[in-house]
Amino acid sequence: MTKKRTIGKNFGNDLIKQLYKVKGVISVTIVGSFVNNYNLDKVGDLDVVIICKKITNKIVKNSKEKIKKIKFKYPLIKRSLKINDTFGPVKYDAKKFLTIHMMIYDVKEHIEHAINSPFTCFDWQRSDWFKGKKLKEIFPVENIYLRDFFESRRNSNEYLRDLKNNNISIRKYQMYKNKIYLRKKNYKIDKKNRGEFVYHIINNLINNYNKLYINKNLKVSSKNFYKLFLKINKKNKYLWNEFKKLKKQKANLNASYSDKSILLAEKFLKNFNIFLENERKKCKSLTFLRHAKTTVDDTIFLGQGRNPEILKSNLKLKTNKKYDVIYSSPLRRAISTAKLFGKRNIVINSYLNEINYGKAEGMNLKQYSKKFPEKIKMWKNHIDTKFPQGENIKDVKLRMLKFLRTLIIKNNFSKALVITHNVFLRCLIGYFLKIKTKNYFKMNIDHLQKFNFILKEKKIHPDFKRKDLKKTLFKLYD
């Protein structure tokens, strides 16, 4: 390792160590390009994510003081220190300043950020340069979904609109009556910022699409980046050469950018949006739904042993959505729910059944604990025990996987609805989000709550609405 890289790595380690000492901080992570090269001379800014239990003015102030003190330990770093405490893509003169982009969130704000900006948070999760809790442990972004490209914050069209107006919206902490608030502000950008933003927009979109395509949180290789760029832009070599020029300019911290970068962004984004729409058209739509609420109390075990009807109030439910096929479990509450969406093309499939509670059917948790204390003890030891004369999570998961294989084989639909039950859906979501079986019971799934998937090239991928996912998973990360 060269002397400059050693200095950079030591600086980063000191930064993490000192910031983690701030009272109330539970996680410090260095993210961005500095993670890969450690060379402070080659980064425009150093991004550090700080998570605390609850944000206070004291934490913000103490964090800034820690950063300023660290700089004095490294006299070989000639650039002046600048702390950027805003949330947004603000860039400062890299020739003059070593900018520390200090992003402080409390747990609640980090969860909101993961929901609204999954691309950013998913990228941050790759970093192993941290102290305290991993970002993924606080609230994970397990996958990139196709809908994220259309619904997430800071999407491509939003960036383009800002670039054209030479204006970017950012957020910044402000004090008011001894309380700290996050305020939205507008920031004017210059040609250099504009050029760098265009590069990052294109680079990030291709990287994010690659993560969706391979279903892994990996940076795309140079070879595959080139292939994807040409695929998106219909083999337009002129655009590729313009992007290469932009990349070369970005490597020079003192470079200035021409107005051509805006034209490149416009052409690329137009092609990217067309490409995404075509990709979406190739996908088959799958919606999994928990049946409507029944006449039975939710606090007792309701599995396969009883067959209640749904509440009459649900019969007023109206939907304009049309499905080629509706799959339903054989239980009355599922079939009645399926009929709310259309009486034709309902296919009964026993794989979709609720868990078999066996002798526990009709009991509440207190009664079950009293009658089968050994089963409760096994639960507490994270053993996936079967209900007496019934099933366990593994049994339901096996049924769930068999049903998914059935869908892949019999894929003669463009839009399908699947009516099933609480435990089946916990197994389905837990499987795709890699949640530990012992934590399945913490998932909250409301009646009539929908979970979206897509079927593409004989593979099923989640396409969840992030806000719905937050409602389902909040008990796992509270």
Image (cartoon, grey):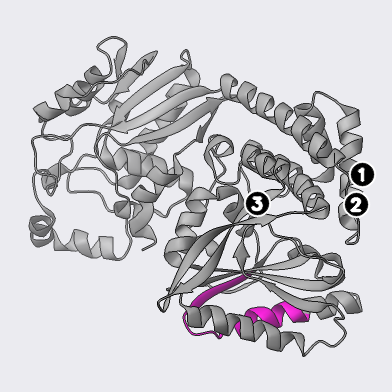
Q: What amino acid is labelled 3 in the image?
A: Ile
Asked whether the viewer can see residue 140, the reply is no
Mark 3: few, some, or many residues within 10 Å (few <14, many ≥20)?
many
Q: Quick check: 107 above or below 388?
A: below
Report how far apart the C-alphas of labels 3 and 2 lie in the structure.
22 Å
- In the image: residue 405, left or right of residue 253: left
N-terminal of the pair, mark 3 or mark 1, is 3
Q: Quadrant of the N terminus?
A: bottom right
- The 10 Å Cα crowd at callout 1, few under 14, some 14 to 19, many 20 or more, is few
Residue 169 lies in the magenta stretch: no
Which residue lies under the disc numbered 1? 245
Residue at which label 2 appears: 249
| Mark 3 or mark 2, earlier in chain | 3
- Inter-mark Cα distance, 3 to 1: 24 Å
Residue 32: image quadrant is: bottom right
Amino acid beneath label 1 = Lys
Q: Is residue 37 above or below residue 464?
A: below
> The magenta stretch spans which residues?
10-29
Q: Are marks 1 and 2 in contact (CB under 8 Å)?
A: yes
The residue at which mark 3 appears reads as 168
Secondary structure beneath label 2: helix
Picture coordinates of residue 113, whole percent (x, y): 51, 56
